Image: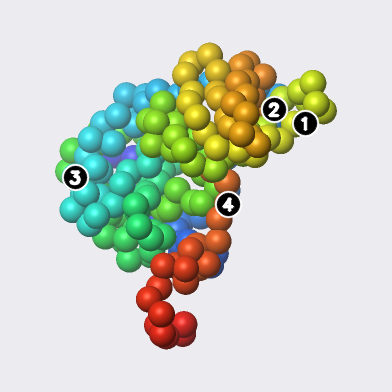
């Protein structure tokens, strides 16, 4: 174990079919402290870890949704959030990525300070923070939280994501495209969905439901 590395401590937490191999506390969405939303870019540490973890994830058919290097209180956390195109991320998925990634981090030692590694699912109501997130989710159902009510008195907008750039996000609601400046947006998240219902709808007739 190299300088300052905190030993890997996997935590298992599950809600329905969605599982993580950690859980402390999810950071509050960007706008809940009164700040407007801004598209994020990878920091140097996040970029290095992203390049390390992507080949590991791809080997197991997974997508790296995000890498975050965040400080909470006196502690630093390196968080790797995974996704899968066709199903929920499982505990086994997270373990498959955690072990080789932890070994690589020990070998290459790219982070000077002590930190805790956490690997888990991006979740069904993930916040969209980066340009790649918005590009990947065009056409998906999203919820937009405004800092202040719009002219119709709404702060929460549900619709289909049309586009997003560094200035504004456009969402289609009731057949109409509405554009909201990011300066007035607290956060944008994927809308929740019933994974079990989706799987059941795709199951062949006569399939065992148990």
User: Circle 3 sits on which residue?
Assistant: 55
User: What percent of the width, then of the height, locates residue 59?
Assistant: 18, 53
User: Circle 1 sits on which residue?
Assistant: 154
In-front residue for pair 77/32: 32
The colour scheme is rainbow
Residue at 34% in and 40% down: 4
Going from N to C along the chain, the mark reached first, 1 or 2, is 2
Crowding near pointer 2: few (<14 within 10 Å), some, many (20+)? many
Could you tell me how far apart the alpha carbons at marks 1 and 4 are, in whole angstroms?
19 Å
Could you tell me how far apart the alpha carbons at marks 3 and 1 are, in whole angstroms?
43 Å
Going from N to C along the chain, the mark reached first, 2 or 3, is 3
- Contact between labelled residues 1 and 3, with CB atoms less than 8 Å apart: no
User: What percent of the width, then of the height, locates residue 77?
Assistant: 44, 41
Residue that lies at the very extreme toward the front in this rendered image:
175
Could you tell me how far apart the alpha carbons at marks 4 and 2 are, in whole angstroms?
18 Å
Crowding near pointer 1: few (<14 within 10 Å), some, many (20+)? few
User: Circle 2 sits on which residue?
Assistant: 146
The relative height of residue 57 versus residue 182 in the rendered view (above or below) is below
Nearer to us of marks 4 and 3 is 4
Secondary structure at numbered mark 1: loop
The relative height of residue 27 versus residue 162 in the rendered view (above or below) is below
Could you tell me how far apart the alpha carbons at marks 1 and 2 are, in whole angstroms?
8 Å
Going from N to C along the chain, the mark reached first, 3 or 1, is 3
Q: Residue 192: which numbered mark, if any? A: 4
Residue at 55% in and 61% down: 194
């Amino acid at each position: 174990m190299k300088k300052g590395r905190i030993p890997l401590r996997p935590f298992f937490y599950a809600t329905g079919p969605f599982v993580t191999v950690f859980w402390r506390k999810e950071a509050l969405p960007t706008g809940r402290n009164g700040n407007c939303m801004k598209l994020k870019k990878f920091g140097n540490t996040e970029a290095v870890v992203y390049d390390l973890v992507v080949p590991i994830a791809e080997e197991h058919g997974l997508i790296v949704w995000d890498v975050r290097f965040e400080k909470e209180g006196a502690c630093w956390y390196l968080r790797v959030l995974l996704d899968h195109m066709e199903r929920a991320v499982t505990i086994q998925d997270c373990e498959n990525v955690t072990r080789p990634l932890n070994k690589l981090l020990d070998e290459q030692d790219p982070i000077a300070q002590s930190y805790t590694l956490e690997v888990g699912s991006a979740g069904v109501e993930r916040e969209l923070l980066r340009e790649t997130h918005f590009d990947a989710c065009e056409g998906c159902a999203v919820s937009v939280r405004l800092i202040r009510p719009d002219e119709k008195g709404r702060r929460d907008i549900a619709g289909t994501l049309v586009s997003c750039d560094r200035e504004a996000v456009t969402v289609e609601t009731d057949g109409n495209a509405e554009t909201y400046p990011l300066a007035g947006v607290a956060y944008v998240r994927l809308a929740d969905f019933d994974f079990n219902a989706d799987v059941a709808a795709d199951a062949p007739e006569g399939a065992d439901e148990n």
